[in-house]
Image: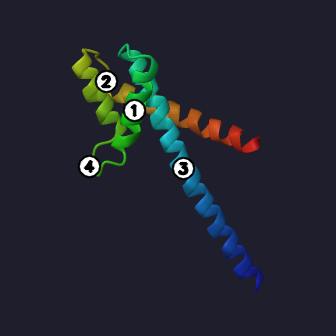
């Protein structure tokens, strides 16, 4: 095998790992996002965990909706006013936290 083939395989392996990490980070972000939203709506305990799972599920339900749209709808139904920009900003912050958590877990 040539050095080029070795390098190509290394790049492919890194790409797969990066894609897997990004997928895991999105799932973690949606869980954190759901728990945060539940807290904002006054939902606690097991109901908050169930709500967080429903936020994760929205990404896999086959529709074109995402977690942000679910939270926006649920906030409106609960009488909470928060702009889409603020909600998307919170998602971005939680994505960074999710990535950091995953990196820390990998170090252990």
- Quadrant holding the N terminus: bottom right
Q: Does residue 102 appear to the left or right of 69 in the view shown? A: right
Is label 3 in a helix, a strand or a loop?
helix
Q: Can residue 83 be seen in this view?
A: yes
Mark number, residue 63: 4
Q: Which sits earlier in the primary sequence, circle 2 or circle 3?
A: 3
Q: Mark 2 points at which residue?
A: 83
Neighbour tally class for label 4: few under 14, some 14-19, many 20 plus, Cα within 10 Å? few
Q: Which residue is labeled 1 in the image?
A: 88
Residue position for label 3: 22
> Are dots 2 and 1 in contact, CB under 8 Å?
no
Q: Earlier in the sequence, mark 4 or mark 1?
A: 4
Residues under labels 4 and 3: Cα distance?
Answer: 21 Å
Q: Residue at x 36, y 37 (%)?
A: 67
Q: Is disc 4 placed on a helix, strand or loop?
A: loop
Q: Which mark is in front, 4 or 1?
A: 4
**Real-space CA distance between mark 1 and mark 3, rounded to the nearest whole angstrom:** 17 Å
Q: Residue at x 32, y 20 (%)?
A: 82
Residue 66 pos. (x, y %): 33, 41
The local crowd at label 2, few if under 14, some if 14 to 19, many if 20 or more residues have their Cα within 10 Å, is few
Q: For mark 3, does the 10 Å Cα neighbourhood hold few (<14), some (14 to 19), or many (20 or more) residues?
A: some
């Amino acid at each position: 095998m040539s050095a080029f083939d070795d390098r190509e395989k290394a790049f492919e392996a890194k790409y797969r790992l990066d894609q897997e990490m990004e997928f895991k980070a999105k799932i973690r972000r949606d869980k954190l996002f759901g728990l945060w939203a539940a807290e904002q709506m006054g939902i606690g305990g097991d109901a908050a965990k169930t709500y967080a799972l429903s936020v994760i599920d929205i990404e896999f339900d086959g529709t074109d909706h995402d977690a942000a749209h679910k939270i926006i709808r649920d906030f409106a139904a609960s009488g909470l006013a928060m702009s889409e920009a603020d909600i998307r900003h919170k998602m971005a912050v939680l994505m960074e936290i999710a990535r950091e958590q995953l990196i820390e877990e990998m170090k252990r």
